[in-house]
Amino acid sequence: MNESLPVAIIGAGRIGRQHAKWYQAAGCRVVGFLGSSEESVGRTQAALHEMLGVTIPGYTDFERLISETRPVAVSVCSPHALHCQHVLQAVDAGVAILCEKPLAWDEEKPLAEILLDARRMVAAAEKKQVLLAMNAQYVAGLPAYMEWYAQVRGPLDRPSRYEAVMQSRGRGGGAEYRDIWIDLGSHPLSLIVKWSPGVHIEPGSIHCVLRRKEVVADFRCVAANGNVCDCSIRLGNVPEGKLERRFGVNGFLLDYEGRNNPEGVFHTYLSHGGEEREYPDLLLMSIEAFVRAVRGEGEPLISGAEGLRNLELQVEILEHAVVEQGAAD
Ligand SMILES: NC(=O)c1ccc[n+]([C@@H]2O[C@H](COP(=O)([O-])OP(=O)(O)OC[C@H]3O[C@@H](n4cnc5c(N)ncnc54)[C@H](OP(=O)(O)O)[C@@H]3O)[C@@H](O)[C@H]2O)c1
């Protein structure tokens, strides 16, 4: 990526700092970031300096950030409930947007209103012809998956069964019940949306159980071409130990791990049947695809419309979920 693209990070917290790191690695210039208070902005600036070796101006006012640093693109990495506000502000400013998953979510709002927010975001971007993309980086692993699948099984014709397992430490270690689904659900759904274009869920097929530390969702999805695929998603919040992350179709599953390579660079490792292969970090690949799209040289991994479809599925499944409390709860 030759000429350096000026980008800003809206919320340089846990994932926002990773966006900043990978923008820099992709040859972009991080020209500013937004935070919630003067004090927290100071802390973030020091953390970014240590990470990137440059002092990046921090702001608490969105319009000032845009007018003084003039980014061409922003990553919206603020908490879910602020995605809608920040994306609409970015659309107004006419800058390209990579919004973290889920496209929108506000615990204070009914589910129908969350969907309305997301539809407003996509419609506003379309109307102003601003690029809106969503980040759910596992989609970046699909070409590697397809290549591996083809080597072992031959070309993938039709996915008939989709499986995903994803564990995390949970937000602040404490995500439970529906919060696990809100936090992690968009990742496996992003793969389903890619694998089954135009997907809808077969009515009556959803069985979703919310447990204190685990969410299990089984449902049947139908693609626009009529292909039917049974989907099984298991999400968990585990406090310690190796995280299980696995995905695939038709029983061919790859395990995912993200860790530093011997040079200290965070990479993706996919494994199957005792064999492990190394790839660039999936978030880096997502950001590179977004940067190419901003330059008019390709498509982002997940468009705003696909991010909206993802959210619609996430909401639909949650609407059918039942809570199952264990003896210890
Ligand atoms: N793709 C992934 O793998 C992945 C992983 C983690 C999170 N995420 C998503 O990324 C988003 C952020 O999650 P996170 O874990 O990074 O959260 P986080 O660590 O809490 O960071 C949130 C950031 O938003 C900023 N912020 C909060 N209120 C703000 C306000 N009123 N105005 C401007 N900035 C504000 C915070 O700035 P201050 O510090 O200044 O308050 C902080 O930098 C969520 O939507 C989450 O789902 C995605």
Image (tube, grey):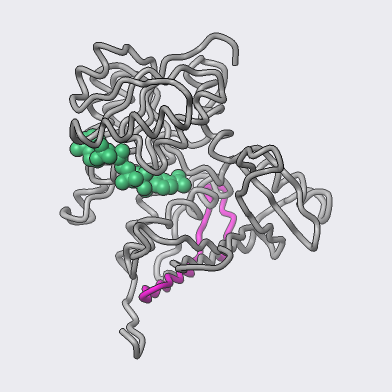
Relative height, residue 166 to residue 28 (above, below): below
Say which residue appears at 43% left-offset and 72% top-offset: 214
Viewport quadrant of the C terminus: bottom left
Count every numbered label the image shows and give the total: 0
Residue 41 pos. (x, y %): 26, 31
Based on the picture, tell me whether residue 192 belongs to the magenta stretch.
no
Q: In the rendered image, which quarter contains the N terminus?
A: top right
Give the residue at x 36% y 75%.
212
Q: Dividing the image into four equal quarters, which quarter contains ligand 1? A: top left
Frontmost residue, 227 versus 175: 175
What residue occupies the far bottom of the structure in this picture?
327
In depth, the one of 179 and 207 nearer the eye is 179
User: Would you say residue 219 sits in the magenta stretch?
Assistant: yes
Q: Find residue 58 and report its horizontal and vertical position in percent.
A: 28, 24
Image height of 33 relative to 228, above or below: above
Q: Residue 135, relative to residue 201: is it above or below?
A: above
Judge from the rendering whether residue 324 lies leftward or rightward of residue 293; answer left or right: left
Q: At which x and y percent is residue 97?
A: 37, 27
Is the magenta region chiefly helix, strand or loop? strand
Residue 34: x and y, percent? 27, 29
Q: Which residues are magenta?
A: 207-230
Can you tell which quarter of the image residue 182 is in?
bottom left
In the rendered image, the vertical position of residue 65 relative to residue 259, given as above or below: above
Whether residue 287 is visible to the viewer of this picture, yes or no, is yes
Among the 4 quarters of the image, the one containing residue 275: bottom right
Q: Quadrant of residue 15?
A: top left
Image point (82%, 51%), residue name: 154
Residue depicted at x 79% and y 63%: 273
Is 132 placed left or right of 277 in the picture?
Answer: left
Which residue is the extreme one toward the top?
A: 3
